[in-house]
Amino acid sequence: YPFYDSNYAPLPMKKPQQVTTFGPEDVNRNPSFSVSISPTNRIPVNNQMNATYQQSSQQSTSAAPLNQQSEGGVSYEEFRKAISALVDKTDPRPDLADFKLIGEGSTGVVQAAFKVSTSQIVAVKRMDLRKQQRRELLFNEVSIMRDYQHPNIVHMHSSHLVGNELWVVMEYMEAGSLTDIVTHVRMTEPQIATVCFQVLRALEYLHARRVIHRDIKSDSILLKRDGTVKVSDFGFCGQLSDEYPKRRSLVGTPYWTAAEVIAREPYDTLADIWSFGIMLVEMVEGEPPYFDDQPLQAMKRIRDEPAPRFSSSARVSHELNHLLSRCVVKDPRDRATARELLQHPFISKMQHPSCIAPLILQIQNK
Ligand code: ATP
Ligand code: MG
């Protein structure tokens, strides 16, 4: 894809509440980086946002789409053609029935539907090509799940161009996200280890293929009723290569972002391991460190303070404390890899995936 740069990340479709800019006095190596502060604090940000948002807000204060100009010199028609060359050529609609909205994200909507030919319920992510803040990121949505198949990565059945919408038909994760669990119930250490094992298997697989997910957090982990855990939401991925062994752009969700990413140092797949460590804090405490701070303040603390640990009131085992201390390490050279973490003593506390099922029942009854 000649014009594809996966350094780009999308802007939220909803107008940001507030845009804050780091001035040179704030971050010396980072003169023009801004974040949009979402109401929920859970929405990803990127450093392309600054220019695009400020440009458009100068033009008008209305919520007009920010992406009507052609990007990378590629017209809409050329972009549409490039997408259509990648997707299945069939019309998925005759085979799908009973659409029901199950989720909404920055790129579009996700609906559950009945797939007639296989009698399966599937999830259909529908993204309007014309309404993307960084439309080239849609290449991630089509190719990552297609090319990288693993039992702990949400499976993609097919992708299609329907009018001006990209449809990604994928397996339906009926038990929702890990966020639903960590914000409602406390997990036991064997349950945490069981989730960790499955997520680390997916990360080991992706990292071996030099893919950085760049938005690892409980929201990106989806569950099946049987306790199977899968990584989803590949819209922010970065593919490394010999030519580009590191990335530099600020992509991720503030509270989960690795110290070196915030410090604007070149980073690689180890940035996901930091975010995985922050997810450990979510599983123990229900939210990431510094969640009461504004995103910008939290990012400064991540960059400037010692790596966070479990709060002193959290009663966790030595093994779990040690696991966190191997993930949330400020210097990525001292951080463990996914493969190393799979050998960590804490992971041996894992049980059969079905040990997660009671948590799912608990939150359904809330
Ligand atoms: P954002 O940028 O806000 O992360 P997005 O546009 O990338 O959103 P997703 O995060 O992929 O969209 O999906 C939006 C929501 O739809 C998710 O929060 C999730 O709850 C739900 N969802 C996505 N995929 C599935 C699936 N395969 N099965 C069940 N629910 C899903
Ligand atoms: Mg997303």
Image (tube, rainbow, N blue to C red):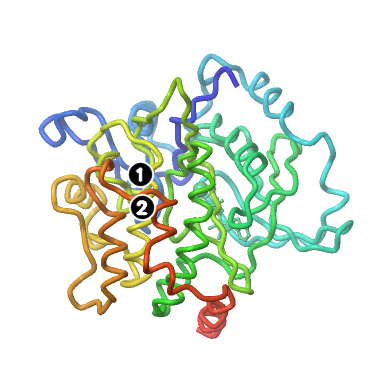
Q: Horizontally, is 11 left or right of 305 in the view?
A: right
Label of residue 271 in the image: 1
Q: Quadrant of residue 85?
A: top right
Q: Secondary structure at mark 2?
A: helix
Residue 89 place in picture, x, y as percent: 82, 34
**Residue furthest to the left:** 25
Q: Horizontally, is 167 left or right of 253 in the view?
A: right
Residue 183, placed above or below residue 94: below
Q: Horizontally, is 85 left or right of 246 in the view?
A: right
Q: Nearer the viewer, residue 317 or 117?
A: 317
Residue 200, placed above or below residue 90: below
Q: Quick one: quadrant of the N terminus?
A: top right
Q: Nearer the viewer, residue 47 or 181?
A: 181
Q: Residues within 10 Å of mark 1 (few under 14, many from 20)?
A: many
Task: Please give the residue where the numbered disc 2 appears in the rendered image.
Answer: 275
Residues under labels 2 and 1: Cα distance?
7 Å
- Amino acid, disc 2: Ser
Residue at image x 28%, y 42%? 332
